[in-house]
Amino acid sequence: MTATPRLLLDRERLERNAARLRARCAALGVTFRPHLKTAKCIEVARVAHEGQTGPVTVSTLREAEFLIEGGFADFVLATAITPDRLPRVAALQDRGARVTVVADAPTMVRVLGESAAQPVDLLLEVDCGEHRSGTDPDGTTLLAVAEEVARHPNLRLQGVLTHAGHSYGTDDPARLADLAEGERASAVRAAERLRARGHRCSVVSVGSTPTLLFARHLEGVTEARAGVSLFWDLAQLSRGMCGWDDVALSVEAAVIGHQRTFPGAAGALVLDAGALAMSKDTGANAFMPDARFGILADAATGERLPLSIAVLHQEHGTVPVPDPGWLKRLPLGARVRVLPNHACLTAAGGHGGYDVHIGDGVPTARWARCDGW
């Protein structure tokens, strides 16, 4: 029997999720540029593009260096970089790739421009409300950044990019639609200001799963980036973005212990899926408190069980049970699936790849993923 914990990926659900995203982008009239920061996998990228290659978003250069081996050659690096990474960008370009980087401050642009040994495409990042990074679409810095780009012959301004990460703070469809409009309007307004000053702005890029799904329209936008929606997770399920049968990613774990005395419960199961296998992210819990660190499912059918991981140690996951019968139903050595609270961080654990199955938890293929930066 295969060792646990291991990362399971349901191919049928993955394909269905990808088709939904493609259809949504087509209906909104924008290019789908899937974000591969969750999957970091060539085969998943191909599923996202219906068996083909196409434009993708990455969060690390390591992802681009990995995906180019599968024929992908159009990358937006959605995390700002420092000049010491420009040689890696150049190496990808020398292999025929287009790598578009982002910047949000004149100083950042200046150091990139002074260090770039060959032309680099660049998007200006706009803050549409999350306040993580990006510049005010209505402020003076936006134009200052564009003017600084124009001073450097090896920097080529292509457009603007934004991300409504704050959309994860609500599960209200009307509020999500408003946030999607704020994201769209911020990016479009920034692009219009740049064009009015004579700057090139052919790309208007937005991206978050909730805003893509709930946008009323995306007029003026050219592309949408979404990633976790290829896999889904409890954080998204808790907000009504998907259903239980849409979640494609899970962790298969084995019962390695029975704790007969556990405070407030009739005992507990101990799984071999700890913090390194699941992550300690609890993003779902604001809307689904019983999600905890992951909800258990039947190993063969994926049917939801009324159990979840309450305590995580490095290699142990503790699951309180409401009655002692669960200790008999799931004896030592029994297998379960655990649906992750946050797929991105669970996939980034020490699994090394995906055991791909078609609904029954029995792997038919092994898909590699990359890690690192």
Image: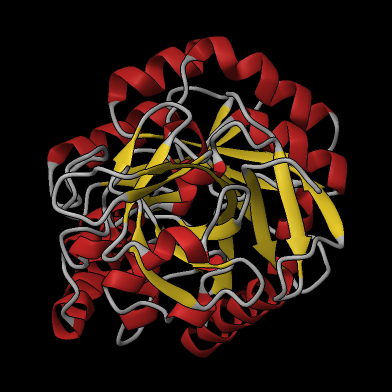
**Residue 33, percent across and down?**
58, 61
Q: Is residue 299 left or right of residue 47?
A: left
Instruction: Give the residue displayed 34% in from the left and 62% down from the top.
Output: 324
Instruction: Give the residue displayed 66% in from the left and 36% down from the top.
Output: 63
**Residue 173, percent across and down?**
20, 83
267 relative to 96, above or below? below
Q: Quadrant of residue 351?
A: top right
Comparing 66 with 300, the one in front is 300
Q: Quadrant of residue 184?
A: bottom left
128 relative to 65, above or below? below
Q: Is residue 170 left or right of residue 83?
A: left
102 relative to 33, above or below? above
Q: Quadrant of residue 331?
A: bottom right
Comparing 71 with 36, the one in front is 36
**Residue 149, percent across and down?**
42, 30
- The count of marks equals 0
Display coloring: secondary structure
Instruction: Give the residue displayed 60% in from the left and 31% down from the top.
Output: 350
**Residue 304, percent across and down?**
45, 75
Comparing 229 with 244, the one in front is 244
87 relative to 267, above or below? above
Q: Quadrant of the C terminus?
A: top right
Q: Is residue 246 visible?
A: yes
Instruction: Give the residue displayed 42% in from the left and 72% down from the top.
Output: 305
Q: Is residue 278 left or right of residue 292?
A: right
Q: Is residue 15 left or right of residue 255?
A: right
Q: Is residue 72 visible?
A: no
